[in-house]
Image: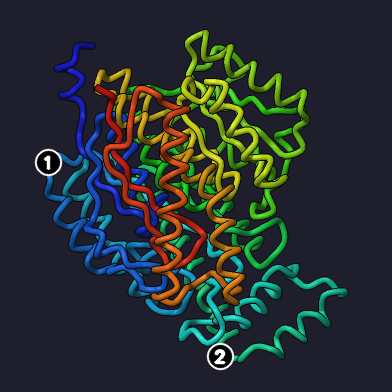
Amino acid sequence: MNVLHALSLLAAIAFVPLDDRPVSAQLPVLLGRIAGVTVTTPPRSKLGNYLQPGDADGIVDWLTARSNDPNAGAYVVSSDMLAYGGLVASRVPGPSYADALQRLAILQTVRHRRPDAWIVAFGTVMRLAPTGVPAGTPYFAAYPEWQALQKYANLHDPLLPSEEATAAVLRASLNPATFDAYLATRLRNLDVDRHLIAMRASGTLDRLALGQDDAGPVGLHVAEVGLLQREAAAIAIGPVPAIEPGADELGMALLAGAIARDARWTPRVQVRYSRPGGDAFVDPLEFAPISVAIDGLIALCGGRLVDSDPDIVLAVRVPQTSGAQDDAFASAMLADSASGRSVALADLGFFDSYASQAGFANRVLTSGLAARLDAYASWNTNANTVGTALAEAVAAGSGRRMHTYDSLAHRTFTFMRFVDDYAYHDDVRPQLNAWLDQRGIADHTLLTPADAALVASRNRALLWNRAAAILEQLDPGYHIAAIDISLPWRRTFETEVDVGIAPNL
């Protein structure tokens, strides 16, 4: 395929993110740059910020305009943003079921106007706990009510006899109106997810993914997931809706799948765990063994799971990996890279300790292995980590096949992952939390504007130095041309790094 022909195949992707966090809004756009595909998003002002919902009706208007754009060949849409105003907004009372359906109807308009476009949506099954915020915050179920709701929701449904006394105590500690509103919100979201499955069955959507947001194998969500799985399985045409653990990574995975579709490529992905039995590990925030989410993410990224001759080796480092197993794992990645295979490293060592994750990240950086990886991630949950790493590798492979690959964008993405997943979470974030604790601020979930400004300043100073050192290890022929470091949600849970790197002259 020549370059001109490849360019003629490309179309822009209209992308509605889950919220305005980097993982939701920034990284998907960067994936497009790696592949040479334009990803357009609504203005950031429409996406809300943390406890402030996004402008869902403004998102409808944006999609209406995009439905008339002949350059948009695919639409990847967060149903939570469209229906409620984002992930956090989906966990609280607010828009009614009727409001949500009225907004989701724009997807039918897009289908009518663009019958040949690829239209996919991703939503969530509501997590068990509302968003945790400090006591006294004027927000739904602030501490300690959110904690009581979380404990109640994590009980069996129906209750075990041994749980009945605990459930009674928890219910008594809650305002009845708050408890009823929580259950009503779960029911609203379940009905919206069922409506999305019906939209997939009708052909309005070409693909649908529903991720179970932060919930283990026991709780109120189990019956909901079971019902959704049964209704999804009844669909007779095309890909059955995916219902699996995860949330934040779904946008990236489906976007990568849209890019691979543009490239007319079905990536062959082989999963290699760092120790025997690694596939059976259960993430505490997921309702199934990690292999369930991993297999599902491969499909969402447009790939196919294989046992041999892969295009991409997804190397998954799981907890309880011994030193000898780490040695063999690193050696295998080097061998795969030397043979010309794309290697995506998803390090779940943080389930053991951040020290374990940091040690292995330092190892791959100092050994030169990091520079040979096609992707790296090591943050939050199994699904978040794997979805990020796999999407990066698929975007890079798609761009190479279309001859639109952007090496600088790819280097930048990988650099940002090491700065964020490794330097921030393993080193800088613990320092920031310790500093807040010393000042008597034990709850870091929502800082005052004044405290947030002080923490953001310390974060910039600490992370800038770590970023420069990492780039010297990862890409010694490049330097930081510009960098902006912030705390996007007035909490220490995540940072945002906007960086430009350039070759040394």
Q: Nearer the viewer, residue 343 or 163?
A: 343
State whether residue 502 appears in this view. Answer: yes
- Per the rendering, the mark at residue 70 is 1
Task: Tell me which corner region of the image, top left, top right, bottom left or bottom right, holds residue 266.
Answer: top left
Q: Residue at point 28% right, 62% down? A: 105
Q: Earlier in the sequence, mark 1 or mark 2?
A: 1
Position of the C terminus, as image quadrant, is top left
For the residues bearing labels 1 and 2, Cβ distance under 8 angstroms = no
Task: Tell me which corner region of the image, top left, top right, bottom left or bottom right, holds residue 176.
Answer: bottom right
Q: Position of residue 457 (x, y in %)?
A: 40, 61
Please state which amino acid type lies under the numbered disc 1: Pro
Q: Residue furthest top?
A: 339
- Per the rendering, the mark at residue 230 is none
Within 10 Å of disc 2 (Cα), the crowding (few <14, some 14-19, many 20+) is: few
Coloration of the structure image: rainbow
* Image height of 257 relative to 405, above or below: below
Q: Position of residue 430 (x, y in %)?
A: 59, 56
Q: Residue at point 76% right, 80% down? A: 167
Element assignment for label 1: loop
Please state which amino acid type lies under the numbered disc 2: Ala
Q: Residue at point 20% right, 25% down? A: 9
* Image height of 400 relative to 115, above or below: above
* Image height of 439 relative to 263, above or below: below
Q: Position of residue 31 (x, y in %)?
A: 34, 37
Q: Nearer the viewer, residue 55 or 323?
A: 323
Element assignment for label 2: helix
Q: Which residue is mark 2?
A: 177
State whether residue 253 appears in this view. Answer: no
Within 10 Å of disc 1 (Cα), the crowding (few <14, some 14-19, many 20+) is: few
